[in-house]
Image (tube, rainbow, N blue to C red):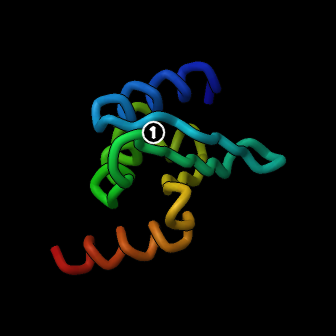
Amino acid sequence: MERTELLKVLETAAAERGCTVADLAFDEDDNVIDVTISKEEGAVNLGDCEYVHRAVLAAFDRDVEDYALTVGSAGISGAEADALLKEMEDKD
């Protein structure tokens, strides 16, 4: 996955929710991606994280690119965000 393309998708999706990309980290193999978003006015909510996450999923095929993605905010860890998303999906 091209990092500049990923950053463009992240920044566009975050901006659509009134957020910015505060941090972008990769593991040593570049296939585990941890994104932190922030919001100048108000708090980042789960919907913001989910929106950015889904934008990346729509832009990059996980089967082709082989990556794991976590989107969170400074106020919530990636693991907490993943657990909340799973809980929401299980309710659907």
Using the rendered view, name the quadrant where residue 18 is placed: top left
Using the rendered view, name the quadrant where residue 22 is placed: top right
Q: Position of residue 20 (x, y in %)?
A: 46, 34
- Residue occupying the far front of the picture: 41
> Which residue is more in the foreground, 52 or 68?
52
> Which residue is more in the foreground, 75 or 25?
75
Q: Amino acid at mark 1?
A: Asp
Using the rendered view, name the quadrant where residue 79 is placed: bottom right
- Say which quadrant the N terminus sits in: top right
Q: Which residue appears at 79% of the width and 46% of the height?
A: 29
Horizontally, is 45 left or right of 65 in the view? left
Q: Which residue appears at 35% of the width and 68% of the height?
A: 85
- Say which quadrant the C terminus sits in: bottom left
The residue singled out by tag 1 in the image is 61
Mark 1 Cα-neighbour bin, 10 Å: few <14, some 14–19, many ≥20? few
Q: Position of residue 73 (x, y in %)?
A: 50, 55
Q: Position of residue 15 (x, y in %)?
A: 36, 29
- Residue occupying the far left of the picture: 92
Q: Which residue appears at 38% of the width and 25% of the height?
A: 12
Q: Is residue 29 above or below residue 72?
A: above
Whether residue 89 is visible, yes or no, is yes
Callout 1: SS: loop
Horizontally, is 78 left or right of 89 in the view? right
Whether residue 57 is visible, yes or no, is no
Q: Which residue appears at 50% of the width and 66% of the height?
A: 76
Q: Is residue 5 above or below residue 32?
A: above
Horizontally, is 71 left or right of 45 in the view? right
> Which residue is more in the foreground, 13 or 39?
39
Q: Is residue 55 above or below residue 73?
A: above
